[in-house]
Amino acid sequence: QVQLRESGGRLVQAGDSLRLSCAASGVTFDYSIVAWFRQAPGKEREFVVGIRWPSGRTDSADSVKGRFTIARDNAKNTVFLQMNSLKPEDTAVYYCAASMGLFTSSVRNDYHSWGQGTQVTVSS
């Protein structure tokens, strides 16, 4: 099973940019989709953006379209989340997740591997 580890979260100001990383290890072919989810205090974990192998197709939540992008470095087995024009409402713990599905799902239970999360805090 693939193991995922997120990094890059920190405190930033509104309007700033931030890049998160998700490094995969273990059985790295054991997934076809990697996605980012986030969970704010007192709220449900929500889908942010996902990328498929091998097509590279990406899917994003409406709340982040035009601001967040996902990309991968195949050689490093790493997926990146580039976040621009950050807003206070983007404050959350960001999680990386992997799925063997054929299509990018926004449903948490469709993902079989999860990282431990990284905190992103956006101050106003």
Image (tube, rainbow, N blue to C red):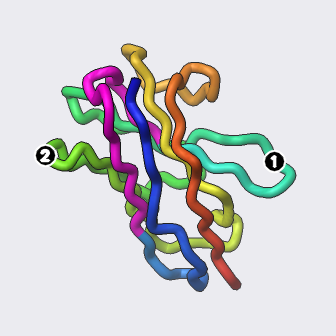
Mark 2 secondary-structure assignment: helix
The magenta span reads 19-35
Q: Residue at x 44, y 72 (%)?
A: 18
Question: The disc labelled 2 sits on which kind of residue?
Answer: Ala
Mark 1 secondary-structure assignment: loop
Judge the density around disc 1: few (<14), some (14-19), many (≥20) Cα neighbours within 10 Å. Answer: few
Dominant secondary structure (helix, strand or loop) of the stretch shown in magenta: strand
116 in magenta: no
Q: Residue at x 38, y 30 (%)?
A: 2
Measured from the top left, where is residue 41 in percent x and y?
Answer: 81, 57
Determine which residue is flagged by label 2.
75
Q: Earlier in the sequence, mark 1 or mark 2?
A: 1
Q: Nearer the viewer, residue 92 or 59?
A: 92
Residue 98 at least partly seen: yes
In the displayed structure image, the side of residue 55 where residue 42 appears, left or right: right
Furthest toward the front, the residue is: 26
Judge the density around disc 2: few (<14), some (14-19), many (≥20) Cα neighbours within 10 Å. Answer: few
Give residue 25's quadrant in the image: top left
Residue 54, compared with residue 65, is above or below; it is above
